[in-house]
Amino acid sequence: MTDAPVEERQQLDADEAALVARLRAGDERAFDDVVTRFYPSMLSVARGYVRSRSVAEEVVQEAWLGVLNGLDRFEGRSSLRTWVLRIVANTAQTRGVREARVVSISSLRSESEEPAVEPQRFRGEGDPFPGHWWSYPTDWRTLPESKLLSQETLDVVKNAIDELPEMQRTVITMRDVAGCDSDEVCQTLEIGEGNQRLLLHRARARVRTVLERHLDA
C-alpha cells in the first residue's frame, strides 16, 4: 500500500485530532458522524466472533460504551477507527455468552493449512496433464450483469461467507464488505500480514467456488 504524501498525512492527523477533541467535549454531531462511519465495520468485526446478528449488535453497543469511556486514554498510536475496531474485537472475545467464539492459534494454523481450492478440481498424477483444471472457472465477464447482481446471487455470497471458518469470515468481511485495509485488519485481529493475506486468499477462493456452482447451474 503506497504511503500518503506527508502533507496529506499531517492533514488527516489534524482532522482526526480535532474529531477526537470534539468527541471528548461531548459533541453529539461528532458522535453521530463517527457512528455512521464506523458502525458497518464494527458490526463486521463482531460478526466474525458471533453468528447471530442480534448478538453482534449487542457487542457493538457494548463496545460503544467502551469507546466513550476510553476516549481519554486514546493516544493516537493507530487511527481512531482501528482503535475502535480493536475494542469491538476485545468485547466480542470476552463476552461470556455461548455464541461468542474465541479463535485460538491452533485453529488459525489449521485454517492456513487447508487447500484454497478443492484438490479434486485438478487432474491427478495419472492424467496426461497432471495439476491442470478438469474444467476452468467461469469467466464472469461473459455473464449478464443482472445475474451477477441479482438478490439470489448476493444471498449465495452472504451465505458462503457465513459458512467460512471464523478467521476467514472475519478477514473477508472486514476487507471486502467493510472496506478495511490490510493494516487495519492486522492491527484489529492482532495477526501478521502474511496470515491476513493467506486467510483472505482462502476465504475468497471458497466463496468463489460456491459462487461458481451457483452461476454454472
Image (cartoon, helix red, strand yellow):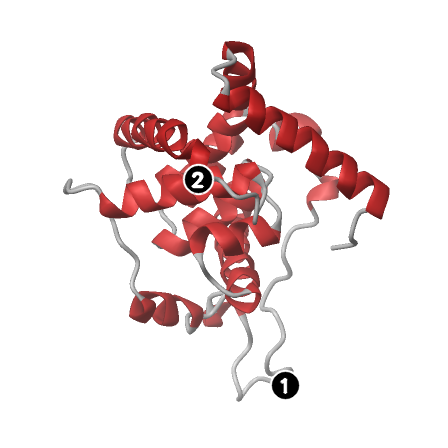
N-terminal label among 2 and 1:
2
Say which of 184 and 172 sits in front: 184
Q: State the image coordinates of residue 129 (x, y, percent, origin top left).
A: 64, 82
Dot 1 falls on a residue whose secondary structure is loop
- The kind of residue tagged 2 is Arg
> Foreground mark, 2 or 1?
2
Give residue 193's quadrant in the image: bottom right
Q: Which residue, given by chain and number where applicable, does mark 1 sit on?
A: 128
For the point 29% across and 64% down, which residue is it?
A: 104
Say which of 178 and 123 sits in front: 178
Report the quarter where the N terminus lies.
bottom right
Q: Which residue, given by chain and number where applicable, does mark 2 sit on?
A: 73
198 lies left or right of 2: left
169 lies left or right of 134: left
In the picture as drawn, the residue positioned furthest to the top comes out as 29
Q: State the image coordinates of residue 136 (x, y, percent, origin top left).
A: 64, 61
